[in-house]
Amino acid sequence: MKRLALPTILLATSALFASGCVYKMNIQQGNYLVPDSVSQLKEGMTRSQVRFLLGTPMVPDAFDESRWDYYYFFNSQKIKAPLKRRLTVYFADDKVARYENQGVPTQADLEQLERDLRKARAVTKSDKDKNKKSGSEEAADEPASDASTPSEAEKAPDPVPPSAPLPVPAGTPSGPT
């Protein structure tokens, strides 16, 4: 009985410790849309132009041919909540009548984010310069941080991988002529 108890306890203990080391795979599903392509989407475009620009929708709606939904879902153990994005394109007479963008970044969004980031860096730098010049005790209590080191927000990578370049269509030259 004692011979069986020790291996059982060791096996249960090792299973308990090993359960914390489970690998959770990244899950990426749907249509990843490039911000530059989403920025080019305009009302009045034909279905073939939209398909060329954004690709074929992953989930076609069998009941409503006048609507295309581009869904994107990304889940990783490194992010708390899954990333969900959706772009819905509505057609009337085979042309884009309107579209709804829910979470898909456009080129303008990225440019605004870059401007806001530069502005925040400038404000932070001017605040540090003011604290250094005033010589206040509060500034002495705070640890000095190097302006060249990125903040936590800058260190966090975008969970969405960059898009791969499109393959060259068949029948076209691949090099300079």
Image: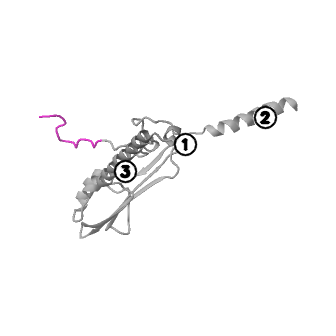
Who's the residue at 38% across and 42% down the image? 125
The label shown at residue 24 is 1
Does residue 34 appear anywhere in the picture? no
Instruction: Tell me: 54 left or right of 82.
Output: left
Which of marks 3 and 2 precedes in the sequence? 2
Give residue 88's quadrant in the image: bottom left
Under tag 1, what secondary structure? Answer: loop
Which of marks 3 and 1 precedes in the sequence? 1
Which of marks 2 and 1 precedes in the sequence? 2
Instruction: Tell me: 116 left or right of 13.
Output: left
Q: Which residue is mark 2?
A: 9
Residue situated furthest left in the rendering: 177
The amino acid sitting under disc 3 is Tyr
* Mark 1 and mark 2: Cα distance apart in space: 27 Å
The label shown at residue 32 is 3
For the record, the magenta segment spans 165-177
Instruction: Tell me: 82 left or right of 4.
Output: left
Under tag 3, what secondary structure? Answer: loop
